[in-house]
Image: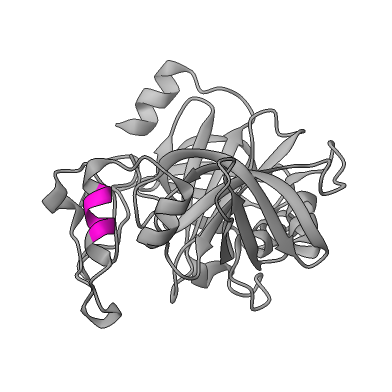
Amino acid sequence: MVQPFNRESQRVQFACAAILRGVCGQFEAAAQDISMTGVRVRVARETLKLDKEARFGAAAACVQNRIGSRFFVDLVPDHGTSPVCRAVVLVRLVQTDGGDECLDLGCRFEVPLGPVEWKALKVDLPESVEQVVRQRACWDEGERPRIDPRVLNGTVEFLFDPPEEADGLGAPAGGAEGEASLRVVLHSAIHAGAEPLVCVAEDLSVTSVQLRISGAAVSEWMSGGCDAATAAQALAEQLGEWPEMEVVGGAQRLWRGAGRVYDVEVGEAPSHDLRVRLTLSRRLQPAELERLRT
């Protein structure tokens, strides 16, 4: 499983009402899961006055214009306690399954949740996470320890900062760490003759591929922004809805087809690498998938 860019602590399933307070006022949403460092909320397209037929790039523009790249989330439990309010940065934007109904917004808290907030939300934490939450109460920010997830036997993803030698990215598709990885070359569907975009394939299935794109490679597209909504719009404007894809192993072209972006996540500073998932224009045959993975 590839380690997500902004997954600094383990998610736990969590459902409650949420209010997003952004550029154009308040929007009702629903929290889907939560961690110490962020929350995923689901907002209906109808709430955003977004047409069900709107493409992903248009949806990203709507989110940015109506909610913003930085906004406030109020988590409102139904057990009578006060809402937990946090300023957040939008780091992921996903068109959900049956994407004509809702969008998922991955939000990173500017200030991580502490014991008081966890108590107010009454979230059942995994034992390993609960132990760390309790310990945090007596830590000064400057003394907060680095926790290597390997010490926890893989039961918890990055709780805080990973060791400097680890970048938090799993081995890409096509081989274990140190072996040659698959490259995917994206060709614009709307700008003939545009420079192709070279990416690394991190995960592959019969219906989708997950790519890592260097932030430096797309920095000119981003217009100074480094949030998920800006990235999704930039990709749509530069590549079109169905960019042509070439999967390359070494000097050999292994597969060619098209893909549609439906999930964009922005990595941490300073690189701001993108992780992008595309649905393939057709399902891969078992023999094709085997060839790409070997």
Spot occupied by residue 199 in the image (x, y as percentages of width and height): 48, 54
Quick check: is 206 in the magenta stretch?
A: no
Q: Is residue 223 left or right of residue 199?
A: right
What is the quadrant of the N terminus in the image? Answer: top left
Between residues 87 and 3, which one lies in front from this camera angle?
87
At x 40%, y 45%, the residue is: 11
**Residue at the bottom extreme, as displayed:** 142
User: In the shown orientation, is residue 186 left or right of residue 177?
Assistant: right
Q: Is residue 162 visible?
A: no
* In the depicted structure, whether residue 220 falls above or below residue 290: below
Determine the image quadrant of residue 95. Answer: top right
Specify the color scheme.
Answer: one colour
Q: Which residues are magenta?
A: 129-134
Return the x and y of residue 272 as percentages of the image width and height: 48, 69
Q: Quadrant of the C terminus?
A: top left
From this view, report whether residue 91 is shown above or below residue 15: below
Residue 99 visible? The answer is: yes
**SS assignment for the magenta stretch, majority:** helix
For image coordinates 87% across by 41% down, the residue present is: 51
Q: Quadrant of residue 62?
A: bottom right
Which residue is farthest front?
A: 80
Residue 167 image point, x, y percent: 29, 62
Residue closest to the eye, 240 or 32: 32
Q: Residue at x 38, y 32 (%)?
A: 292
Q: In this view of the protein, which residue sits in the foreground, 283 or 25?
A: 25
Does the segment drawn in magenta span residue 131? yes
- Give the number of callouts: 0
Q: Tell me which corner region of the image, top left, top right, bottom left or bottom right, holds residue 231.
A: bottom right
Q: Residue at x 44, y 58 (%)?
A: 117
On the image, the x and y values in percent for residue 15 come to: 54, 38
